Image: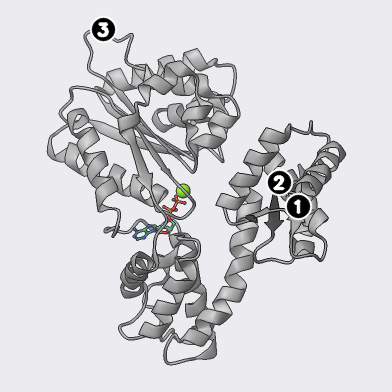
Amino acid sequence: MRNPRLFKDQSKLSFDYVPERLCHREEQLESLDMLFRPVLEGGMSQTAFLIGSVGTGKTATSKRFCLDLMRAAQERGRAMDYIIVNCRQRSTEVAVLRRIVMHFDENFPDRGFSTEEMLRSIRKHLEKRRMHLLVVLDEADVLLSKGAGDLVYQLTRFDEEVVGGRPSLSVVMVSQKNVLDLMDPASRSTFRRSNVIRFDRYGARELADILRDRTELAFFPGAVRQDALDLMADIASEFGDARFAIELLDRAGMLAEEEGAEHLAPEHVRGAKALTYSVVTESKIEDLDKQHKLVLLAVARSIRDQAYVRTPEAEAAYRLAAEEHGERPRGHTMFWSYLQDLSNQGLVGTRVANEETGGRTTYISLPDVPAKVVRARLEESLGRS
Ligand SMILES: Nc1ncnc2c1ncn2[C@@H]1O[C@H](COP(=O)(O)OP(=O)(O)O)[C@@H](O)[C@H]1O
Ligand SMILES: [Mg+2]
């Protein structure tokens, strides 16, 4: 392979990389700092709740925060640790608890333990180490929508039984939507309104700053043209999604590199855009749960070669698709809320129009990928599960 002329360190564009500096998230980090200052002093435990759509930096911010908090704890000689649990990968109470228990005891037996026993074991480990643990439940909505509210309740009330000991467990929940609705009133009261930290979609200027920082880390000086950077920020601002922006930078860089170009130029950005749309969409589709997949499948089937499909037709197609895949079709309200979720993720577009009859109809569109492709992808994925 040719020596890279553009990339200095491509790994800085990978999703696992946590930047030292998160521009435009200072406010959110500051709020977290404030909330957790008393925890650091050893006086209390805390709960917080990060909410925002895809690619707004929730995961990156919580990772950055955990690392910063550990540093601060170390400086103060406090025993502190953190665990970030991806609840999409571990979406049951038992799976989440096992992840936490195994953080302390790799050889913890695979089965045969109740949630109570696992909670007790976690408490024992923390007491023994006189340690405070911060548990981050990333994508917590997946966990809660599967009815694991009790676990959240248990974790947020973890210290209540402890008499005389110091508070030992804090919880941060991260989610795309407001999971407060998915909780029972008891746990909801723990996540007081004041502890909600919001992540708005990024605008073009903010994305330009994020891209500039990443460019400096990942490329040689001068390798990326300013007009190319501006174009990427502009394209990604449609979704306000930093993940999309960085993916675009990565792919445009690879295209330019393959070509042996001197610079990453707007033409590479356009090429990357065509590729990235479908890649981002595919990974989003894989992440959906079964009901959301069925709704999207229904849209893709009923839209055929039209630009739009109206909600009633899509809903009829959804009921058929659900039955076909052995799922109970949910009612209209749930269908509607699934549709909104898909729209928030940019997987469908929705537009409300006033009809001549005086009523209002919602028109659903598929923004970037051909319906045929979406359909095939979903049928394949639903067939596997
Ligand atoms: N303010 C920021 N500065 C630098 N990089 C960012 C920023 N916000 C997000 N990113 C990067 O964008 C990508 C998506 O962010 P992520 O935290 O995964 O979003 P979310 O969890 O909200 O979907 C990650 O690679 C992350 O490092
Ligand atoms: Mg995330």
Badge 2 crowding class, 10 Å Cα cut-off, few under 14, some 14 to 19, many 20 or more, is few
What residue would you read off at disc 1?
310
For label 3, the SS is: loop
333 and 81: which is toward the camera: 333
Q: Indicate which disc, 3 or 2, sits on the residue closer to the N terminus.
A: 3
Up the image or down, 330 lies above or below 271; here it is above
From where the camera sits, is residue 98 visible? no
> Which of pointers 2 and 1 lies earlier in the amino acid sequence?
1
Question: In the structure shown, which secondary structural element does the residue marked by tag 2 occupy?
Answer: loop
Q: What secondary structure is found at the residue carrying circle 1?
A: strand
Taking depth in this image into account, of 115 and 295 the one nearest to the observer is 295
**Disc 1, disc 3: CB below 8 Å?**
no
Q: CA distance from mark 1 to mark 3?
A: 59 Å
> Residue 65: x, y in percent?
29, 45
Q: Quadrant of residue 146?
A: top right
Q: Position of residue 111 (x, y in %)?
A: 59, 21
- Tell whether 177 sits left or right of 223: right
Please identify, in this view, whether the residue under mark 2 or under mark 1 is nearer the observer: 2
Residue holding disc 3: 163
Q: Position of residue 148 (x, y in %)?
A: 55, 24
Work out whether 118 lies above or below 311: above
